[in-house]
Image: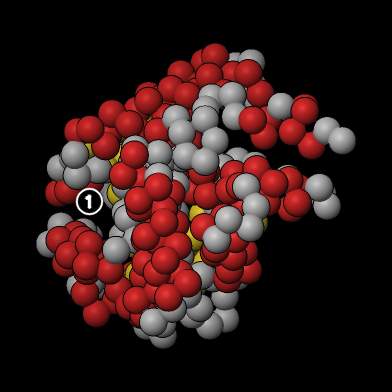
Amino acid sequence: MLLKSITIAGADTLGSEISWYIAFNGYRVKLYDTSDIGLEIGKALHEKFAASFLEKFTSNREQVDTTLKNIHYTSDLEEACQECDLFIESIPEKMEAKIEFYKAISQFISPTTIVASNSDSFIPSDLAPHFKHPLQLVGAHFTNVIWENRLVEIMGHPDTDILVIESLIHFIKNLNILPIVLQKENSGYLLNSLLIPMLSTALTMLRKGIASFEDIDKSWMAIGNKYGPFIIIDAVGLDTVYNIEKYWGEKDNDQKRASNAEFLQNEYIKKGKLGMISGEGFYKYPNPLFSRDSFLKI
């Protein structure tokens, strides 16, 4: 199946990044969010990406302007589902919200539309019972800053049509991104199964006062890694990491992760510090401390 028209649901950082990059590659894109405020955030992020692409990746103003024109914004779910070959769900990591969302799109989505969940906490089998066309449902987890970190992990469930996976692989390759297909469902896929425990441990060390977040980042970056854990959390969004820690804290009765979630909520999220998207998380943006040459200076 040739995928031409793409909808992304969720105008947060990752949803906006995915929609921008797909549009940059010449596809027609609809970005859906439940609120006009969310869409305004998405538009602001797209303008930011446009400026960044002009500075770092291309001097072609026409290509950037065309990318912006390729993106249509809507808060109407029925409109978001119409004339859509691929529907990428990237809404907040809350199971109740996911269930209600899949029930809602079942009213409008075409039975031929591929629906890909960008969730990294919930596997497709968690969502399939709540969706009208489970054969069309697949997991597709995009990395943050997809134009730099070129990886999409694909995860089917037992009823996913093999043609859905093959079409998605072809689409991802056309974006010049590496697709990796998991042989079994796994919460966290591959990358986040390795990454999330590190972020959780970093939060625990900060919460216990073992070291500052800057020094924890420096310890990871000093051995050759590009980003430290708190830089990654700022990029992903503190609210996303909060939802992940809260979910696993409750699911596994893990007091450490539950305490991490409470720490994030009280010390940062309640104060409006959500990460890069809000201008401040652990670091302040647009000129964070870690971007300076002096950050790792001996």
Seen from the viewer's position, the closer of residues 229 and 157 is 229
Above/below status of 218 relative to 296? below
Mark 1, Cα crowd under 10 Å, few <14 / some 14-19 / many 20+, is: many
Mark 1 falls on what kind of element?
helix
Q: Write the residue at 51% across / 70% down.
A: 188
Position of residue 75 in the picture relative to residue 196 (left or right): left
Q: Position of residue 148 (x, y in %)?
A: 64, 42
Instruction: List x then y, in percent, for residue 282.
Output: 52, 41
What residue lies at 67% left-to-right and 34% top-to-bottom? Answer: 290
Q: Is residue 170 visible?
A: no
* Amino acid at dot 1: Cys
Residue under the image location 46 percent in, 18 percent down: 65
Residue 147, position as x, y percentages in the image: 60, 41
Give the tally of numbered discs: 1
| Residue that appears at 26% across and 37% down | 38
Q: Quadrant of residue 172?
A: bottom right
- Quadrant in the picture for the N terminus: bottom left
Q: Outermost residue, front direction?
A: 209
Between 97 and 285, the residue placed more toward the observer is 285
Residue ID for mark 1 = 81
Q: Residue 48 or 289: which is nearer the viewer?
A: 289
- The quadrant in which the C terminus is found is top right
